Image: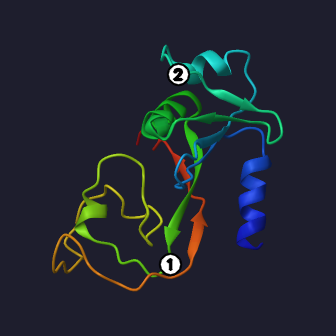
Amino acid sequence: MQDEDRLKAAWNQETIPVALRRDGKGEQVRVHLPYADDNYAWLRNGRCIRPIWNPTLSCWEIPKAWFNDLVNRCLCRWGRIYVIQPYQEQEICAPACMNAIGHECQCSCMGANHGQSDDGGWFSTSEAFAARWGDRQLACPLMAVEADK
């Protein structure tokens, strides 16, 4: 299945929440939630700003500043979430990614190393590394709460 087909399949399924983090100026996060009567109130979570329903795309739009909280709350409520976000193909993973706090990842690791810290398998030359940027693409990992062992 092609990447575009995988993205569409994730977005169109009805049982797992999906967050599309867009990074353009003024663009908001698009959110597709499994149907529930309280989705508006749940998304708003007592904030002054109100989520906006986009009837054309059948999704909610929320401020970028809510992204990390949204992911955490979806993991608590549903146990998993698809996070669609842009990344650069040729970017190199660095300590800044591995030691990051929050869920935003623009690194080519597509979140695989994000916030996981360095297990000793990486050779780091600095906190930041310059590299050529490849084409911008979208990653769509399924984040899930780890079951108790």
Q: CA distance from mark 1 to mark 2?
A: 34 Å
Q: Position of residue 94 (x, y in %)?
A: 27, 71
- Look at 30% across and 57% down and name the residue there: 116
Q: Residues within 10 Å of mark 2 (few under 14, many from 20)?
A: few
Figure check: 116 above or below 73: below
Residue 68 figure quarter? top left
Residue 62 figure quarter? top right
Residue 146 figure quarter? top left
Q: Is residue 117 left or right of residue 49?
A: left
- Look at 22% across and 66% down and name the residue there: 118
Please state which amino acid type lies under the numbered disc 2.
Answer: Ile
Q: Quadrant of the C terminus?
A: top left
Name the colouring of the figure: rainbow
Outermost residue toward the bottom? 132
Q: Position of residue 66 (x, y in %)?
A: 47, 34
Q: Is residue 134 left or right of residue 19?
A: left
Q: Quadrant of the N terminus?
A: bottom right
Question: Which label sits on residue 49?
Answer: 2
Outermost residue toward the left? 125
Please state which amino acid type lies under the numbered disc 1.
Answer: Glu
Question: Which label sits on residue 35?
Answer: none
The residue lying toward the viewer, choosing from 71 and 41, is: 41
- Look at 51% across and 18% down and name the residue there: 45
Figure check: 120 above or below 44: below
Which of discs 1 and 2 lies nearer the camera? The answer is: 2
Q: Secondary structure at mark 2?
A: loop
Figure check: 75 above or below 2: above
User: Quick check: marks 1 and 2 in contact, CB under 8 Å?
Assistant: no
- Look at 25% across and 63% down and name the residue there: 96
Outermost residue toward the front? 25
The residue to which callout 1 is attached is 89
